[in-house]
Image (tube, helix red, strand yellow):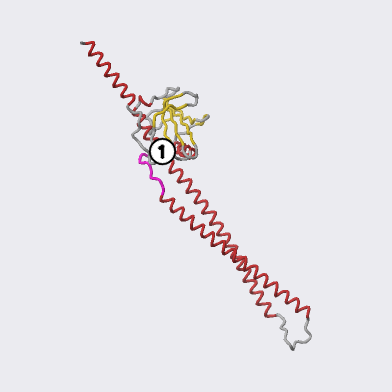
Amino acid sequence: MKKIILICVTCLMASFAMSQELSYTESPYTSASGAKPAIKQVLNYDKNLIIGYEITFNYPVEDIEAAVVKRLATEGVEGKQKKTFYIFQGIKYNYLWDKKFDMYMAFVGSKNAGTIKVILSTGYDNFIIPTQDNITTDKMFKWLTELDIDIQQYRYDVAMVAHQEEYKDIDKELSKLEKKRNNVEKKLKKNANAQSKFEASRTIVTENSVNIDTKKIEKEQKKAQQLIEERSKLEAELAAINKDITNVRSDLSKKNTAIAELKKEQPRTNNSK
């Protein structure tokens, strides 16, 4: 009887241990864009298959990598890149663990999607088995899920900076055109003054004119033609500048609209941060 009870207890304990080990293979967390973290075999930097964590987002992998590395650096977690992995040794990062540990992180994917792969170790390659540490796994799943917002914020910031730089370039172009227009308008005014002064002193030829200086008349006619051609050229230049100003102002207005629309899409912040 005692043997039977002992066997039953042993079986129950084994069953409980197994249920504990396998109870956290599925993540209860889903990111803002619908991504779910998972426990997978992850190839570490020494080409060994280790059980770790991963999550895939539908963003360019370079944006994912830049956003995550930036967040960790902001929170004081600095790592070194070795081959395809980032190595963070002897770090203290309470979002994942309340003691010092090593973390290995890789980013793989394309312009359409990227996957974050993570392995944790207590040091000296003593890797944590995710299915045997529900507390750490829960924290990791939560942290990986919340990275979605960090990536969205990074992409938002990059897009906003690009828009603002483009706005500055367009605004500079507008300033140049307006300065150019002012210069042409000054030249036109100068031309008009010269025309008025010329007409005031120009020789008037009538039927009763005698002793006409034909050379002087020819010179005056040439001067009059030069003034007319100069004005015509300046007016054409001014019309072209005004057309460019209209187009640039339209581009500036469109860029303002794009910035306003982008602001509406600013990601929410993680409550945990």
Q: What predominant SS class does the magenta segment belong to?
A: loop
Residue 251 coordinates in the image, percent (x, y): 52, 57
Asked if residue 269 is among those painted magenta in the image, a careful observer would answer: yes
Q: Position of residue 150 (x, y in %)?
A: 42, 41
Q: Secondary structure at mark 1?
A: helix
Locate residue 2 relative to residue 78 in the image: left or right.
Answer: left
Q: List the residue tagged with mark 1.
A: 147
Q: Quadrant of residue 53?
A: top left
Residue visible at 50% across and 49% down in the picture: 162
- Marks counted in the figure total 1
Q: Could you say which is closer to the camera, residue 65 or residue 42?
A: 42
**Residue at the farthest left position:** 1
Residue closest to the eye, 11 or 149: 11
Residue lying at the far bottom of the rendered structure: 208
Tell me the quadrant of the picture where the N terminus can be found. Answer: top left
Indicate the quadrant containing the C terminus: top left, top right, bottom left or bottom right. Answer: top left
* Position of residue 226 measured from the top left corner of the image (x, y, whole percent): 70, 72
Q: Which residues are magenta?
A: 265-272
Image side of residue 89 versus residue 228, left or right: left
Q: Going by the picture, which residue comes out furthest to the front?
A: 112
| Position of residue 228 in the picture relative to residue 75 (left or right) | right
**Drawn side of residue 218 relative to residue 248, left or right:** right
* Residue type highlighted by circle 1: Leu
Percent across and percent down for residue 9 are 25, 16
Residue at 49%, 48% in the rendered image = 161
Against 165, residue 239 (above or below) is below
Which residue: 55% across, 62% down? Answer: 245
For label 1, count other residues whose C-alpha is less than 10 Å away and answer few (under 14), some (14-19) or many (20+): many
Residue nearer the viewer, 210 or 47: 47
Q: Residue 142 colored magenta? A: no
Q: Quadrant of residue 129?
A: top left
